[in-house]
Image: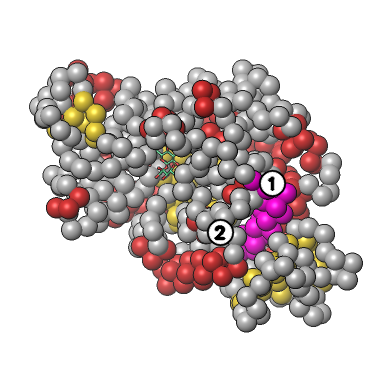
Amino acid sequence: QSRTDWWRDAAIYQVYVRSFADGDGDGTGDLAGVRSRLPYLADLGVDALWFTPWYRSPLADGGYDVTDYRSVDPAFGTLGEAEKLIAEAGELGLRCIVDIVPNHVSDRHPWFRAALEAGPGSPERERFHFRPASPEPPNDWVGEFGGVPWSRTADGEWYLHLFTPHQPDLNWNHPDVRREHEEVLRFWFERGAAGVRIDSAALLAKAGGLPPMAASPDHPFHDRPELHGIYRSWRRIADAYGAVLIGEVWLPDAERLARYLRPDELHTAFNFDFLGRPWDAAELWESIERTLAAHEPVGAPATWVLANHDVTRTVTRYGRAGDTGFAFERKRFGVPTDLALGTRRARAAALLTLALPGSVYLYQGEELGLPEAEIPRELIRDPMHARSGGRDPGRDGCRVPLPWDGAPEPSWLPVPEGWAGYAAERQAQDPGSMLSLYRAALRLRRSFGDAGPLVRLRPEDPRVLCFARTGRDGAAWICLVNFGPDDVAPPAHTETLLASGPLTPGGLVPQDTAVWLRA
Ligand code: TEU
């Protein structure tokens, strides 16, 4: 574990703690469960683990509503267990990333309680965005989950919350807010965290005076210039520990994202553009090219994300006819899905993303090929569902506990019928399973080492996406994905290393299939 720039080409596995593995059998995932599955993760071949928030929380937004950033929620375990987990993971060569939620706190956080108690005009309220009582909300902003991002306290004052009313936004102009988060960073770096994932990283700063949309020349709360100063101070802290800052910077384009990727700001950030594209060679190539072009001049690695805890599962997304590809376009109930098609494409997509230069984020359960689960309305826990007036099923469909040796039982979310068929233990025995594909791909990817830049091959062929990189041993590593209806011949004088599905008897690559070749 000596490389300090390990994050440049790492495969990072996202552990959604509440649904990963249940150590005490109460239906909720926990740290004991994670610890017991560390060998599985090491064997899978990933380099690092990112844990969604495990801090004390009323779980109004799945833990993105924190009451104590220096703790572990009793439902998940103890701080001591988190330290043990980080140490044990390290022994297996797995680095650990914790999730920091700086934009807002829980409405049960001691600061917000104190603000409510101290009343209007109090210094306690200055850590948040409070506005005097008025009949209408203080401005016309729309929240991130839709709707009015303002709620009233008992004394009539308004407070700002870009997410749910249980997540009041912090005032990042307040010195306490800055100091507290800098201390929280040190707290987790001291405990061995190799880095932090910064939640909602583009939202912290708000335009002075919280002006209405039309009165603000730039967006009043997205991508504000004031953010850069915050991340510069964080970078100094991270550098002192050799830790990495990973931004969840939601921006419409790679160029704007790249402005945060600097030697004195964030090391790296999620690129969500790829995730927003449909299964189409031209669309995906455009995204790849654009991402690489934006990252290259700033010297930051590109990142690739196929799924996370906020979006539709890959096999479901790619299995929907007429899918626009935009994973965040909110889900509807009862959309017909061809899971066999989606699975074929998800397998090909896995080989595609794992062959691209940069780092890859892999969301738990994708390696099992889990589809999006349909949760009955009355059992949906995600607050996004209620905030959409019940139209949007929300994000629980990708948050169902993982099947390890059968369908998880009990489980805090209902497990769809037939999920025992996806069980990790069963897939481990099956060379044709999604799990075996991911294992083989991650192993090969690692063997190529820090492979060179991507060179596109066959650019004239609109049916394929084909590119080569040069591995550590000087040999070419070629990835070819066939999107078209006709079988495609792989480049001459190549040897097939891995295929996402069966090739034809003549060795041709069928539609929706990817191959890795060596020349
Ligand atoms: O998500 C940030 C974010 O911007 C989301 O609103 C995103 O647009 C949406 O989920 C897409 O479906 C982060 C976390 O990943 C999410 O789970 C939290 O709910 C949110 O922050 C609030 O902390």
Find residue 339 and name its label.
1
Left or right, 222 with reference to 396 = left
Q: Main secondary structure of the magenta part?
A: helix
For the residues marked 2 and 1, what is the alpha-carbon distance in whole angstroms?
16 Å
**Residue range highlighted in magenta:** 337-356
Q: Position of residue 38 (x, y in %)?
A: 67, 36
Residue at image position (56%, 54%) is 323
- Observer-nearest of 512 and 256: 512
Residue at which label 2 appears = 278
Image quarter for residue 43?
Answer: top right
Q: Earlier in the sequence, mark 2 or mark 1?
A: 2
Which numbered tag is attached to residue 503?
Answer: none
SS label for mark 1: helix
Q: Is residue 511 above or below residue 151?
A: below
Image quarter where the C terminus lies is bottom right
Q: Secondary structure at mark 2?
A: loop
Residue 239 percent location from the top left of the image: 41, 52
Towards the viewer: 473 or 328: 328
Magenta residue check for 418? no
